[in-house]
Image: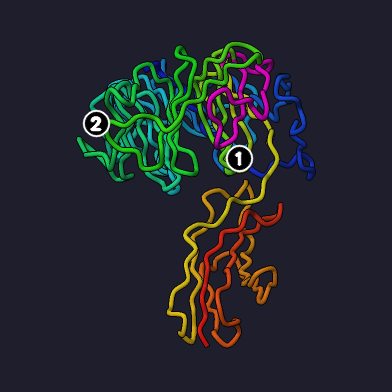
Amino acid sequence: MNPLRIVIVAAGAALTGGLLVAGPAEAAPVDPVDVRPERTIKGATADHLSASGRTYGVRARSHRVVVYGAKARGNARPLYRIAGSRTRLFQPRSIARDSAGRLYVANGNKRVLVFGKNARGNVRPIRVLRAGMPVGSVSMTPDNRLMVAGSTAIKVYRRSASGKATPVRQIAGDKAQLNGAYDAKMNVDGRVWVAFGEAELISVFAPGANGNVAPERTITADWAGPGLWEPEMLSFDRAGRGYVGLHSGHVYVLGSTATGDATPQLVLSNRRHGHVDGLSVSRTGKVAVTGGSKITIYPRVRALTAPWAVRAVSVSGSPAAKNRVVRWAKPLADGGSAITRYRVAVKQGTTTVKVVRLKALRRSFTLRRSSLPAGTSTVVVQAKNRKGYGPAASVPITVVK
């Protein structure tokens, strides 16, 4: 696996002068779109863009981690560095940050170093994970676990893993065909995408894939688009869209269900950044691309969407019970905007007999038998963000009076 230069960008709201920056959402997918970046940071070789606007990067040749402020641009000095003999940093190639602010660094010696939130200067890592393989990239999964992609396997660990810890699960073996992988990331739905530049494909593994398993599907994107299809870097936004950095420098944006000869929703031109060495999409949708020893940070390039459907809708209680409790789980993807409310409706045929709207933190609602019609009805639950309601998820309910 090639040494990776991974970008994590700390993104603030996608606003410029108080106005939402309009992305090129309507561009034809066959035409690369030249987007004016918000800022460029020179001299960095990898980056991760966070929600605060800070940019976390690594410099392999000088064996260090560098962190830039939210407004850093040009030849700005880092806010701080992690470097020195105590750090045990050696040719770092990838960096990730968890919800508690800890940094995970893929080292050039089959190890992952973990640094505390307040680590500065020549400090020791708080943990060292021995991956047992050359490590190409590290990333956090949607459930805040550590995913380590290497030359022979993709391993998922608990965040607290250290030493020769056993992974929670791993994908490896002849059926997985991971030789030549450049990067691997987990989407919001739990599917693992693996980019193979020279093989010109992306393998997608099913949620929970474990052991010697074949991919669920492959993405070839072998169509008459700009440049060669050589996918190397991966990232995802909160709508589940996949961002694919090509060897040519273009960045393709693909839908979460892309398969086969998928046509991208957007092609971000390589004009501003050249070859892609690292790629990160922040929680606010900003895109950070590393290339040519600089980090180029773009505004949101795809619009917000309505949330995905809620999950695991159920109704407890017997048909004759006085109270019936509807429960659900939040959507896997919120479309890039926080869930603001849920809508619970009861329908019998084409008639809506009851509707309630609940706050975003609610995951259940009690229906009283006295307010429901006898017979079989359907309970429908939807999530809403500022773009509107997402798809409905439903479950039947039978009431006996």
Packing grade of label 2 (10 A; few <14, some 14-19, many >=20) is some
Which segment did they paint magenta?
A: 249-275
Question: Eyeballing the image, is 401 above or below 33?
Answer: below
Q: Quadrant of residue 203?
A: top left
Q: Is residue 209 left or right of residue 29?
A: left
Question: Eyeballing the image, is 95 above or below 307?
Answer: above
> Where does the image place residue 48, in percent across and percent down from the top left?
51, 32
Q: Label 2 belongs to which residue?
A: 130
Q: Does the magenta-highlighted stretch encompass residue 260?
A: yes
Q: Is residue 387 left or right of residue 136?
A: right
> Where does the image place residue 218, in percent across and percent down from the top left?
47, 26
Q: Main secondary structure of the magenta part?
A: loop
Instruction: Tell me the number on the disc at residue 258.
Output: none
Q: Residue at x 56, y 32 (%)?
A: 258
Q: CA distance from mark 2 to mark 1?
A: 31 Å
**Residue kind at label 1, given as amino acid type:** Ala
Q: Residue at x 36, y 19 (%)?
A: 91
> Where does the image place residue 166, in percent across and percent down from the top left?
22, 39
Viewer-side residue, 296 vs 276: 276
> Where does the image place residue 200, in percent across and percent down from the top left?
49, 15
What is the quadrant of the N terminus in the image? top left
Instruction: Tell me the number on the disc at residue 11.
Output: 1
Q: Quadrant of residue 89?
A: top left
- Which secondary structure, mark 2? strand
**Residue kind at label 2, given as amino acid type:** Arg
